[in-house]
Image (cartoon, rainbow, N blue to C red):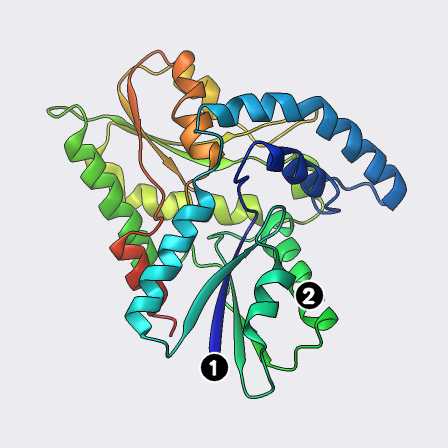
C-alpha cells in the first residue's frame, strides 16, 4: 500500500476549535520562538485567551468553520477516484483535527507499505514545512511505523504549478471588470523579520516565485505587486502590507493568495471580507488551487 498524506496547519471545524488552534499554534516553537518550554506555554496561554474571541467572531462570518478541511477532503476524494485504490490519499493537520496519529492509526502501515509526506506549501518555511514534517515524523516514531517514508519537496518552481496559477488568474481576469487592464496583487502570508534573519528561506522563495509569475503575467496587467498579509503584534514583519496596498488602489484589482494551496480563513475572511472595508477600489480574490482539476493533475505527476 502507498499512502500519500497531505500536511497543512488546518482550519477550525467549529468555534470551539478556534481556541485549540491558537493554543497549538502558539505552543509551536517555530511560531513562538521562546526556547524555554514553560515560558512559551505561559505566553501561548495569554495570547490564546486574548485572541480567541476575535477569531471566533471572524469565523462566524464563515458559517462557523474554515473551508480548509472540506476542500482538502474533496481533493483527496478526487485523487482516490483517479487512482482507484492503487494509491490512497488522506490529510493530517498540525493544530486542529485530524491529527497525524489519528490518521496514521487508521491505516495500520507495515514494512512493505510506503508513506509519502506531501506538505501543501509551495514555499519552504520552518514555520510550515519543517514544523509539519517534524510532527509527522514524531508520530511515525511513536506509533513504531516501519514503512518506507519519503517527502515531496516545495514546488514553487514547478512549471505546471505556475501554469495552473497563470490559468486561474487569467480566467478570473476575463470574468472581472472586462474592458481594461487591472492591478494584480500577489498576497503572501507574512512572517516576522526576525525569523527570516535567522535563516528561514521563505522570503527568498516568495520573491523567486513572484518574479517568475510577474514575467509571465506582465502583458495582461497594468501593475503587478507583491505584498504580505496577516501581520500580528508589534514586531517588524515582512512588508509591504496587503492592507495598505488595498487601501490605496488606483484601479480595480485581482488578488492571488500566493502562499496557500487551499483556501482558509486568511483567504476567505481576511482577503475576501475584512480588507474590503478599507479598499479604495473594487477587487476580486482568485481562489487557491483547492480541489481544481488542474491541481489534481499537478499532484498526479508525482505518482
The residue drawn where x is 68% and y is 59% is 135
Q: Is residue 290 above or below residue 249?
A: below
**Where residue 193 sits in the image (x, y, percent)?**
65, 35
**Within-10-Å neighbours for mark 2: few <14, some 14–19, many 20+:** some
Mark 1 element type: loop
Per the rendering, the mark at residue 13 is none
The residue drawn where x is 65% and y is 34% is 192
Q: Are marks 1 and 2 in contact (CB under 8 Å)?
A: no
Q: CA distance from mark 1 to mark 2?
A: 19 Å
Q: Which residue is mark 1?
A: 1
Q: Is residue 105 above or below residue 253?
A: below
| Quadrant position of the C terminus in the picture | bottom left
Q: From where the camera sits, is residue 223 visible?
A: yes
Kindly indicate the quadrant of the structure image that contains residue 271: top left
Q: From where the camera sits, is residue 259 visible?
A: no
**Where residue 138 sits in the image (x, y, percent)?**
71, 65
**Where residue 87 sits in the image (x, y, percent)?**
40, 75
Q: Which residue is mark 2?
A: 139
Q: Is residue 247 above or below residue 210?
A: above
**Where residue 22 sits in the image (x, y, percent)?**
66, 36
Amino acid at each position: 500500500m502507498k499512502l500519500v498524506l497531505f500536511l497543512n496547519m488546518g482550519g477550525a471545524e467549529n468555534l470551539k476549535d478556534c481556541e485549540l488552534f491558537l493554543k497549538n499554534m502558539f505552543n509551536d516553537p517555530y511560531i513562538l520562538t521562546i526556547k524555554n518550554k514553560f515560558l512559551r506555554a505561559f505566553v501561548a496561554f495569554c495570547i490564546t485567551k486574548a485572541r480567541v474571541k476575535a477569531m471566533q467572531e471572524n469565523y462566524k462570518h464563515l458559517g462557523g468553520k474554515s473551508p480548509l478541511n472540506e476542500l482538502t477532503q474533496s481533493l483527496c476524494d478526487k485523487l482516490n477516484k483517479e487512482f482507484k485504490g492503487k494509491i490512497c490519499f488522506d490529510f493530517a493537520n498540525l493544530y486542529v483535527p485530524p491529527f497525524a496519529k489519528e490518521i496514521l492509526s487508521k491505516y495500520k502501515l507495515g514494512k512493505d507499505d510506503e508513506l509519502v509526506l506531501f506538505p501543501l506549501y509551495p514555499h519552504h518555511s520552518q514555520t510550515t514545512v519543517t514544523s509539519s514534517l517534524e510532527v509527522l515524523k514524531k508520530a511515525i516514531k511513536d506509533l513504531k511505523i516501519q514503512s518506507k517514508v519519503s517527502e515531496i519537496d516545495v514546488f514553487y518552481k514547478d512549471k505546471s504549478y505556475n501554469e495552473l496559477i497563470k490559468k486561474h488568474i487569467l480566467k478570473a481576469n476575463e470574468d472581472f471588470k472586462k474592458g481594461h487592464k487591472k492591478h494584480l496583487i500577489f498576497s503572501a502570508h507574512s512572517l516576522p523579520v526576525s525569523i527570516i534573519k535567522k535563516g528561514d528561506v521563505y522570503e527568498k522563495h516568495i520573491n523567486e516565485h513572484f518574479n517568475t509569475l510577474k514575467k509571465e503575467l506582465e502583458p495582461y496587467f497594468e501593475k503587478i505587486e507583491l505584498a504580505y498579509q496577516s501581520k500580528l503584534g508589534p514586531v517588524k514583519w515582512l512588508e509591504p502590507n496587503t492592507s495598505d496596498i488595498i487601501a490605496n488602489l488606483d484601479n480595480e484589482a485581482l488578488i492571488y493568495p500566493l502562499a496557500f494551496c487551499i483556501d482558509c480563513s486568511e483567504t476567505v475572511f481576511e482577503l475576501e471580507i475584512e480588507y474590503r472595508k478599507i479598499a479604495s477600489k473594487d477587487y476580486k480574490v482568485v481562489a487557491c488551487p483547492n480541489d481544481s482539476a488542474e491541481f489534481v493533475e499537478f499532484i498526479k505527476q508525482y505518482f
